[in-house]
Image (cartoon, grey):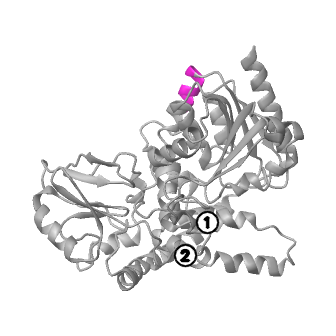
Amino acid sequence: MAIARWLNQTVGFFVFFFLDILDFFLCFTYKMLDFFFESEWKPCYCSSPPEAQAKTRKIIVSERGEYSKVVSMTRTKIHFDEISDTLYSRGPSLLVRLSKLVSSVKCFSYKGLIMRGSVVESCAHNYESKKKISSGNKKRLMTLNSTVVEKSTTTPRWSDCHCSFCTSWLSPSNKDSLFVKVQQPKDNKKARDNVVFIHGFLSSSSFWTETLFPNFSDSTKSNYRLIAVDLLGYGRSPKPNDSLYTLREHLEMIEKSVISQYKLKKFHIVAHSLGCVLALALAVKHPGAIKSLTLLAPPYYNVPKGVHPAQYVMRKVAPKNVWPPMQFGASLISWYEHLGRTVCLVLCKGHRLVDSLTRLFTFNRMRTYLIEGFLCHTHNGSWHTLHNIIFGSGGKVESYLDHVRDHMDCDVTIFHGGKDEVIPVECSYSVKTKVPRSTVNVIPDKDHITIVVGRQKDFARELELIWQRSTTTTQK
C-alpha cells in the first residue's frame, strides 16, 4: 500500500508538472483564438486578482440578468460574495510563477478589472472606459453609480456547441427559465404530492426521466406529480456566458422555474451529488415546504477548524492523483481551466459525433441518454458551477445541515454507492453525524452513477416507501 501511494505521488508529480506547462501554453493559445473568432481578448483565472490601488475605490460586479451589486475591495484581495477563491487560488502552479514574468499579456483591459462573466471598472476612469467600449463591438451597457459596466452577450462562444439541442434555450420563451420535465398524474387526476428531482454535476434531467420515471408504480404515477429540472448551464436550460453560476443564481432559477411556476406549497426533494447542495439550500429557504429529503452521494466534507473550506473541499474532490482514473479526471477539470476547456471543445462541441459513434460500436444496444448530461454543457457553466457550488459551498453545507436538524422535522434519507470514487462514503456518514435522525443506506458494489443507473427499479420502490412514510408521518 505504501509503495502504491509513493508511486502514485511520484508519477503524479511529473504528470501534473507537464499539465502545468500545457495549461500555460493553452492559456495564450485560447487568448489568440478568442481574439480571432470574437475580436476581443477574453479573461481567465490564471493570475490572482491584482493588488488594489486605493482603499477608497468601489467596484461593480455584474452578474446575469439585471442583478448587480457593489462589493468591497482591500489592498490585497477583492472580496466577491459567493465567488469561490479556488477560481484564482489553486496553488503554486507553473503558470502562476511564469505569468509573473510575462507583462505583455494581461487578463485586464483599459485599466479595469475584467472577470469572466462580468466586467468590473474603477470609478476613477468612467468616461474613458465608456468611450473605449462604445467604439468597439456592440455590447450591452449599463450604468450604476456613475460606473459603466459591460455585460457579455449570452450567445454561445465559438468553442461551444451550436446544435439545435444545445441552443434551444435561446428562443424567447425559454431564455429566462430552466427546462423542466413534468410527468403529470394519469387520467388528469389532481396530484396528491409533488416530487422535485435535482441532478448532479455534468448531468441533466434525463438522469431521472430515463431511469426512474418509467419504473414507478401505477399508484405513484396516478398520485404524484414528478418534476425533473435541468440546472442552469446543463441540458436544455439556459447557458449564459455572463453568468458566474453562483449558488444564488442556481437557487433563484429553480424557484422561478419550478416552485413558483408550478405553485408548489409542499414537495419532496430527490437530489444527487451537486444537487444535494442545492437541495439543502432550498430546504433552508423553504423549511415548511419540504416533506422529505432524499440525498444521493451528498458532497459534505467535515472541514477542520482553521482550514479554508473551499480549498479543503477542492483538495478532497481533486487531490491531484493519477489513480484511480476518476480522481485524475476530477483533478484535470478542477485545477486546469484551459485543459478543461479543451476537453469541452473536443467532446462537448462534438457530442453528436460521440453519440453516433457510441451507437455504431454498440450496435444501438446502449442507450446514450447519459451523454446528454455529461457532454451537453459549456465550459463556462461547468467550471463556475464546480468552483462556486461544490467547492465554494464547503463552508455552507454544515450550517444547512444544522438548520435541517434544528428547525425541520422532515425525513432525511441518504443513499451512497459502496464503490463511489467521486464522493467517498464518509461524506454520508458525516451527514448522519450532523443530522442524527437521517438514515444512511450504503449500496455495495455501486458507484457514483450506478447508485441509480442499473438499479432503477429497486430505487423507485425505495423512494415510494420514503414518500409514503413521510405522508403518514405528516398526517399524524
Q: Secondary structure at mark 1?
A: helix
Out of 452 and 351, give the one closest to the viewer: 351
- Vertical placement of residue 137 versus 204, above or below: below
For residue 313, say whether it is visible. no
- Mark carried by residue 162: 2
Q: Which residue is mark 1?
A: 328
Q: In the rendered view, tell whether residue 434 sits above or below residue 93.
A: above
Q: Which residue is at a point 68% across and 80% down the rendered structure image?
A: 353
Majority secondary structure of magenta residues: helix
Residue 405 part of the magenta-drawn span: yes
Residue 240, percent from left and from top: 46, 62
Residue type pointed to by label 2: His
Quarter of the image where one finds residue 306: top left
Residue at the extreme bottom of the image, as rendered: 36
Indicate the position of residue 360 as horizontal and vertical percent values.
Answer: 81, 81
- Counting from the top left corner in percent of width and height, residue 425 is at 70, 44
Bounds of the magenta span? 401-407
In this rendering, would 43 be left or right of 297?
left
Asked which secondary structure carries label 2, the reply is loop
C-alpha span from label 2 to label 1: 29 Å
Q: Amino acid at mark 1?
A: Phe
Relative to 164, residue 265 above or below: above
Residue 81 part of the magenta-drawn span: no
Is residue 21 shown to the viewer in this render?
yes
The circle on residue 246 is none
- Answer with left or right where residue 53 lies relative to residue 38: left
Taking the image as shown, residue 445 lies to the left or right of residue 324, namely: right
